[in-house]
Image (tube, helix red, strand yellow):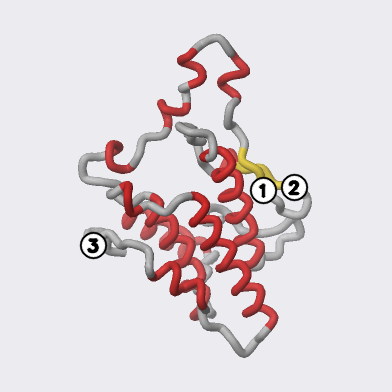
């Protein structure tokens, strides 16, 4: 959603509710994976997201290593080679602020800026960024569960649908209260 163009097949930009639907589908897939103790996707990236004709999204590249050699314990644990929790990935923690700045710069340079001409578009993007930042909190106890992440995304999507039906209400709505209550890392300045 942040890289390249956010357009449908006919070249029109995706509506914000479509972007939230994609995020909801991905969170649902991750929740399904996380319901198996010790399981992680391990290789979550945009190229591992598949889209159907109505932009329904599915995670791919999960569990395929077990098909290559089902008797190998190394193959079953291959995702652990890719995923490392933020607290062990880098002794100074994840560099989320630099990533967010680079995304904003890319979108501004490409002319695909979600905030251009619409003051609330940046607030909309900030909701997903805030949820993502909570997911990579340095303190594991501050990270929301995938069930909570899915609820926050669903709340944001429901509010966005209400807002898009009412041209008078452009406020971020009640879901921003949930996002604002997420723990914040003081050293992460965006």
- Vertically, is 143 above or below 119? above
Q: State the CA–CA distance, disc 3 to disc 2.
A: 40 Å
Q: Quadrant of the C terminus?
A: bottom left
Q: Secondary structure at mark 3?
A: loop
Q: Residues within 10 Å of mark 2 (few under 14, many from 20)?
A: few
Q: State the CA–CA distance, disc 3 to disc 1.
A: 34 Å
Can you give x and y, in whole percent of width and height, for residue 57 in the image? 67, 48
Can you give x and y, in whole percent of width and height, for residue 71 in the image? 55, 9
Residue 52's tag is 2
Tell me which residue sits at (48%, 14%) in the image: 73
Sequence-wise, the earlier of marks 3 and 2 is 2
Q: Secondary structure at mark 2?
A: loop
Tell me which residue sits at (64%, 66%) in the image: 17
Task: Tell me where residue 9 sits by quadrant.
Answer: bottom right
CB under 8 Å between callouts 1 and 2?
Answer: yes
Can you give x and y, in whole percent of width and height, for residue 5 in the image? 60, 57
- Vertically, is 20 above or below 92? below
Q: Nearer the viewer, residue 117 or 45?
A: 45
Residue 57's tag is 1
Sequence-wise, the earlier of marks 1 and 2 is 2
Q: Secondary structure at mark 1?
A: strand
In the figure, is residue 8 to the left or right of 156? Answer: right
Q: Residues within 10 Å of mark 3 (few under 14, many from 20)?
A: few
Residue marked by disc 3: 186
Q: Nearer the viewer, residue 70 or 45?
A: 70
CB under 8 Å between callouts 3 and 1?
Answer: no
Q: Nearer the viewer, residue 52 or 147?
A: 147
Tell me which residue sits at (21%, 45%) in the image: 92
Tell me which residue sits at (74%, 47%) in the image: 52
Sequence-wise, the earlier of marks 3 and 1 is 1
């Amino acid at each position: 959603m942040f890289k390249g163009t956010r357009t449908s097949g006919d070249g029109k930009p995706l509506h914000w509710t479509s972007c939230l639907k994609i995020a909801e589908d991905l969170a649902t897939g991750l929740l399904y994976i996380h319901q198996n103790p010790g399981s992680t996707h391990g290789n979550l990236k945009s190229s591992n997201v598949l889209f159907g004709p109505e932009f329904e999204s599915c995670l791919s590249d999960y569990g395929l290593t077990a098909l290559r050699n089902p008797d190998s314990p190394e193959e079953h644990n291959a995702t652990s080679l890719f995923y490392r929790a933020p607290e062990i990935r880098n002794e100074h923690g994840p560099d989320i602020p630099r990533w967010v700045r680079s995304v904003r710069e890319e979108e501004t340079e490409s002319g695909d800026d979600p905030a251009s001409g619409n003051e609330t578009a940046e607030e909309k993007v900030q909701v997903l960024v805030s949820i993502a930042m909570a997911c990579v909190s340095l303190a594991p106890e501050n990270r929301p569960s995938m069930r909570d992440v899915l609820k926050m995304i669903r709340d944001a999507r429901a509010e966005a649908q209400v807002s898009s039906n009412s041209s008078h209400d452009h406020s971020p709505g009640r879901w921003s209260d949930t996002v604002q209550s997420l723990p914040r890392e003081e050293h992460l300045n965006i």
